[in-house]
Amino acid sequence: MKILSAKFTKGIVGGDYSTNDNLLQFAFLGRSNSGKSSVINSLTGQKKLVKASKMPGKTVEANFFKINDQFYLVDFPGYGFALRSIADRNRMIKRIFWYLEFSNVKPRIIFLIIDANVGLTELDREMLEVINKNNHNLIIIANKIDKVAKTKWESKIQEISKEAGNAKVLGYSAKTHQGRDEVLSEIEKLL
């Protein structure tokens, strides 16, 4: 699959995640600092489509990016550590849970971005529980795989998959674009 066009269309803070065109949504969730913005930029081939920040928790809304006028990539705020108040962090998490449990739109698939070096954190496990409880399609993207020794890639991916209940896990590097074709292929299968 080739991405020929990618543009920001809207940011949502409330509870209505529907779009006028009813195109499919592919949601990107992950801990603050897992590299969600970088993964989306890598997938679309645009370095500045999603504003990446060194400040964890910069994204506070669900940002919709229309791809090839066919579907949306939806970038949610990172959960976990953020340079914000506890109340703000709790509001962001509640919005994600609401989307997963009660939204008027069910995402075609959820890509859960984790740091390959860190593996699943307690917050990732809680997110996985909500995703699985609500029967969402899921693929885990183990980002920053370029920082894991090549001899340990396969075992790291298997370890994450086993811990996540044998979920599909794709190694990814936003820096080198390793895994990009595999993620785009998974999206194309679901269109």
Image (cartoon, rainbow, N blue to C red):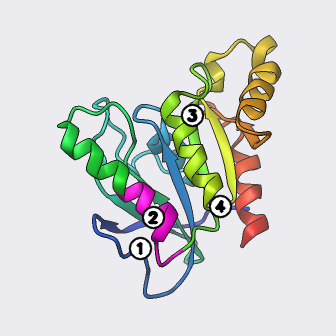
Residue designated by label 1: 17
Which amino acid type is shown beneath numbered disc 2?
A: Tyr
Expressed as whole percent of the image width and height from the top left, the position of residue 191 reads 72, 73
Q: Is residue 112 magenta?
A: no
Q: Is residue 76 above or below residue 191?
A: above
C-beta proximity under 8 Å, tags 4 and 1: no
**Mark seen at residue 136:** 4
Q: Nearer the viewer, mark 4 or mark 3?
A: 4
Secondary structure under the numbered disc 4 in the rendered image: loop
Which amino acid type is shown beneath numbered disc 3?
A: Ile
Residue designated by label 3: 114
Secondary structure under the numbered disc 2 in the rendered image: helix
Expressed as whole percent of the image width and height from the top left, the position of residue 33 reads 42, 31
Magenta residue span: 95-105
Specify few, some or many for label 2: CA neighbours under 10 Å numbering under 14, 14-19, or 20 or more. Answer: many
Q: Is residue 42 visible?
A: no
C-beta proximity under 8 Å, tags 1 and 2: yes
Relative horizontal placement of residue 175, taking residue 14 as reference (left or right): right
Residue designated by label 2: 99
Whichever of labels 4 and 3 marks the residue nearer the N terminus, that label is: 3
**Mark seen at residue 120:** none
